[in-house]
Image (cartoon, rainbow, N blue to C red):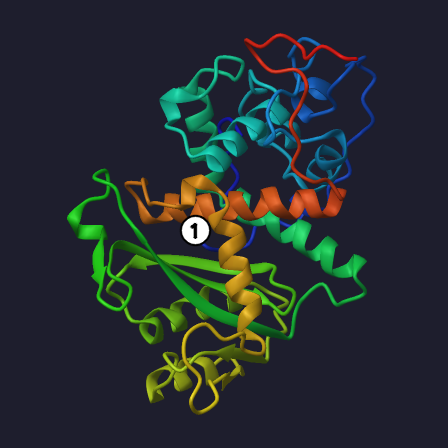
């Protein structure tokens, strides 16, 4: 959001009013879009037509719109209304994450790439993508009859190669996977929904990164996590002490004697599936981000894409109308 001036320390939860504010009803006629900028700002009525598989459907937008944080200017905290539709900006970031293009290669029917990048940076500064996903995750768990906060989770990591844009000081070599780049460490619930992510150099051992991953997740209020399933890499007294400080115990899921190659292991297959889901977003197939926290934000955006489709029960689709293409002739 433009010039968000509320106080928000890095890593701390967003103010309560962002999740509990009651926005007054709008009297403006805004056909096609009901984002905050169209309803309460000065943006002219209208809406960009959906053209790409990554664009949100109306059902997806309804889920995302209900979970979006309220901009500072609407809370009378300073700043001015933005010049671009929220739905269009979200679709632009989703397009980049889903297709893996350069920022400067965004299609012309989106706002200028610099405006989209500034939007991404503002959301990164206030961790809004993570907050948006967390609200969607709570909704998904409650709809499936579960508690909004999980009591058990699974940890795993994935190494990816880095491009030439990643500096030597933020990359490393994973000898086990033969990857020169970075490693993303994730914590999921038992359904495979993302709980936390952290990005390190690829040469950092899993047992060294796990305490920081858990610390980041548990520092938020209302956490109920008690048990985490891990593989044999997550062992050692230092890791056990770090987990015990938060009242969390670990349970190692081991292979049976004599098992070789790929084997589906109880509990661990859930987090492996989540990693494969995330890898469907082409921006995550290779690390192009100069900063590790930008790569972590890309992971949250990829998770938002999948979860919003799940909540809206929408499968990826190929729109009939696309820029620069004639509509297909119908029989």
Q: Residue at x 66, y 51 (%)?
A: 135
Q: Where residue 45 sits: x, y (%)?
A: 71, 10
Residue nearest the viewer, comparing 17 with 318: 318
Tell me the quarter of the picture where residue 298 sits: top left
Per the image, the residue denoted by label 1 is 10
- On screen, residue 252 versus residue 327, left or right, reads left
Q: Examine the rendering and report whether any part of residue 45 can be seen.
A: yes
Residue nearest the viewer, comparing 199 with 11: 199
Q: Where residue 8 sits: x, y (%)?
A: 49, 47
Residue nearest the viewer, comparing 54 with 200: 54
132 up-or-down from 142: above or below: above
Q: Examine the rendering and report whether any part of residue 132 can be seen.
A: no
> From this viewpoint, which residue is outermost toward the bottom?
257
Residue nearest the viewer, comparing 73 with 290: 290
Tell me the quarter of the picture where residue 305 sits: top right
Tell me the quarter of the picture where residue 56 sits: top right
> From this viewpoint, which residue is outermost toward the left?
168
Query: Could you classify mark 1 by the number of other residues whose Cα lies within 10 Å: few (under 14), some (14-19), or many (20 or more)?
Result: few
323 up-or-down from 24: above or below: above
Q: Secondary structure at mark 1?
A: loop
Q: Residue at x 46, y 24 (%)?
A: 116
- On screen, residue 164 versus residue 234, left or right, reads left
Q: Where residue 212 sits: x, y (%)?
A: 39, 68
Quadrant of the image containing the C terminus: top right
Q: How many marks?
A: 1
């Amino acid at each position: 959001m433009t010039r968000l001036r509320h106080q928000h320390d890095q890593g701390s939860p967003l103010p309560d009013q962002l999740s509990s504010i009651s926005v007054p009803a709008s009297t403006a006629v805004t056909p096609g879009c009901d984002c905050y900028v169209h309803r309460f700002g000065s943006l002219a009525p209208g809406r960009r037509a959906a053209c790409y598989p990554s664009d949100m459907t109306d059902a997806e937008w309804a889920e995302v719109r209900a979970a979006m944080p309220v901009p500072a200017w609407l809370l009378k905290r300073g700043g001015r209304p933005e010049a671009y539709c929220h739905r269009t900006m979200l679709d632009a970031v989703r397009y980049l994450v889903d297709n893996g293009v350069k920022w400067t290669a965004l299609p012309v029917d989106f706002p200028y790439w610099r405006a989209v990048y500034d939007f991404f940076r503002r959301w990164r500064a206030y961790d809004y993508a993570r907050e948006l996903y967390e609200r969607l995750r709570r909704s998904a768990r409650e709809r499936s009859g579960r508690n909004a906060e999980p009591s058990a989770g699974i940890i795993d990591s994935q190494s990816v190669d880095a491009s030439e844009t990643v500096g030597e000081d933020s990359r490393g070599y994973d000898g086990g996977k033969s990857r020169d780049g970075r490693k993303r460490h994730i914590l999921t619930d038992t359904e495979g929904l993302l709980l936390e992510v952290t990005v390190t150099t690829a040469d950092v051992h899993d047992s060294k990164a796990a305490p920081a991953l858990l610390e980041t997740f548990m520092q938020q209020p209302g956490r109920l996590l008690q048990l985490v399933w891990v593989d044999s890499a997550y062992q050692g007294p230092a890791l056990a002490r770090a987990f015990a400080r938060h009242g969390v115990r670990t349970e190692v899921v081991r292979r049976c004697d004599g098992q070789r190659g790929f084997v589906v292991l109880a509990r661990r297959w859930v987090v492996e599936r989540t990693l494969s889901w995330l890898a469907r977003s082409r921006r995550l197939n290779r690390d192009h981000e100069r900063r590790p926290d930008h790569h972590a934000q890309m992971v949250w955006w990829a998770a938002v894409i999948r979860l919003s489709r799940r909540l809206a029960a929408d499968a990826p689709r190929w729109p009939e109308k696309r820029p620069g293409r004639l509509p297909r002739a119908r029989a």
